[in-house]
Image (cartoon, helix red, strand yellow):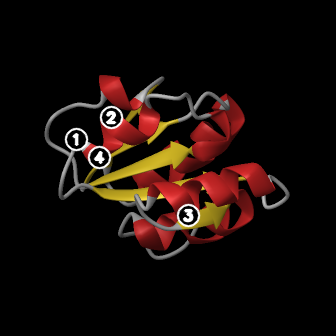
Amino acid sequence: MRVAAVISDLMLYSRIESAASAARASLVRVDSPADLPADLDLVLVDWSARQADWADALRARAGLRIILFGRHTDLDAHAAASAAELGPMWARSKLIAEVSVLLGGSTFT
């Protein structure tokens, strides 16, 4: 599986990276959806850190599976995610709990 994470939080990224390694998934971190590589199966986007051009950049990648995430208390991010209609919006805690299974592994370490 080829995965990209649009994320600046390196602590959270290291947890995603650990799960990707265990699942033998290829993972790359980028700062913006405009920097996404061409051939991906999944992109994880920290929607709490979104910029104005992110929704359009992600829409331009038709067919790409996208999971947005952010703090469960960030109601603005959740509302913006709903309005953008790019994919599900998960709380960070849900991403952490399910990232291993999401990437094809069995358990999170």
Please, what is the three-letter code of the amino acid marked with disc 2?
A: Ala
Figure quadrant of the C terminus: bottom right
What is the x, y in percent for residue 71? Answer: 77, 53
Q: Nearer the viewer, residue 109 or 84?
A: 84
Residue denoted by label 1: 60
Find residue 87 and report its image quarter.
bottom left
Residue denoted by label 4: 59
* Element carrying mark 2: helix
What is the x, y in percent for residue 10? Answer: 65, 30
Vertical position of residue 28 compared to residue 16: above or below: above
What is the x, y in percent for residue 53? Answer: 44, 28
Q: Label for residue 57?
A: 2
Whether tag 2 and tag 3 are in contact, CB under 8 A, the answer is no
Whether tag 1 and tag 3 are in contact, CB under 8 A, the answer is no
95 displayed left or right of 104: right
Mark 2 nearby-residue class (10 Å; few <14, some 14–19, many ≥20):
some
Figure quadrant of the N terminus: bottom left
